[in-house]
Image (cartoon, rainbow, N blue to C red):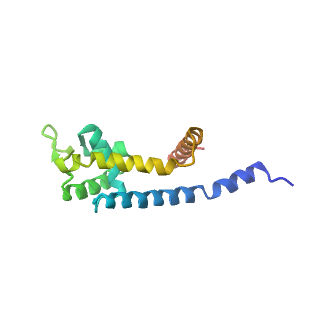
């Protein structure tokens, strides 16, 4: 007797979050290895989004940086503090509004852009091996739908 389509779907999805978590953990391990091979000890994968935004925009208010990378402001503050301690960024209060903290790359931080570009390209190469454009587009659509489903559920809206 063939399995009911709903049961097949449930079975297929049962391990999805686990697979995503495992894939993210492996990607983070890969990134840490790549960073360490470049002599960048103390920079974590979680700093990557901050660097990408600052490479693109130069200087950003801390609150905007948090919004752009989809992280809680307190988390971004802690990440930025670590980067400032390492000499990669500076923070300063905005002259017009002292409540606004601006984050800016130092020369040391700016010099990392080619390294980050190279690591990003290597990550893309590894994660896309054996996948064609159609596979990647379908996977992207699926992930976006799942993210929207969780966002809706967290807002308490019906699915």
**Is residue 90 something that shows in the picture?**
no
Total labels drawn: 0
Q: Residue drawn at (54%, 45%), measured in percent from left and top?
A: 143
Q: Residue drawn at (64%, 54%), measured in percent from left and top?
A: 13
Figure quadrant of residue 36: bottom left
Identify which residue, 119 or 149, lies in the foreground. Answer: 119
Q: Residue drawn at (64%, 57%), measured in percent from left and top?
A: 14
Q: Is residue 134 above or below residue 150?
A: above
Quarter of the image that includes the C terminus: top right
- Horizontal relation, residue 128 to residue 15: left or right: left
Identify which residue, 146 or 120, lies in the foreground. Answer: 120
Where is residue 117 drawn, in percent x and y? Answer: 34, 45
**Is residue 105 something that shows in the picture?**
yes
Quarter of the image that includes the N terminus: bottom right
Identify which residue, 10 or 48, lies in the foreground. Answer: 48
The extreme left residue here reads 95
Where is residue 49 drawn, in percent x and y? Answer: 35, 48
Q: Is residue 159 above or below residue 1?
A: above
Identify which residue, 52 or 13, lies in the foreground. Answer: 52
- Horizontal relation, residue 56 to residue 84: left or right: right
Where is residue 147 drawn, in percent x and y? Answer: 52, 46
């Amino acid at each position: 007797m063939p399995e009911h389509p709903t049961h097949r779907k449930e079975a297929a999805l049962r391990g999805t979050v686990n697979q995503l978590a495992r894939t993210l953990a492996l990607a983070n391990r890969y990134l840490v290895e790549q960073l360490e091979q470049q002599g960048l000890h103390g920079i974590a994968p979680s700093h990557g989004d901050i660097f990408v935004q600052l490479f693109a925009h130069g200087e950003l208010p801390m609150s905007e940086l948090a919004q752009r990378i989809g992280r809680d402001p307190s988390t971004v503050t802690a990440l930025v503090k670590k980067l400032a301690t390492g000499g990669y960024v500076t923070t300063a209060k905005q002259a017009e509004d002292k409540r606004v903290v601006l984050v800016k790359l130092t020369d040391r931080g700016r010099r990392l852009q080619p390294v980050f570009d190279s690591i990003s390209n290597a990550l893309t190469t590894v994660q896309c091996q054996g996948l064609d454009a159609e596979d990647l587009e379908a996977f992207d659509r699926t992930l976006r739908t799942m993210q929207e489903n969780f966002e809706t559920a967290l807002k308490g809206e019906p699915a």
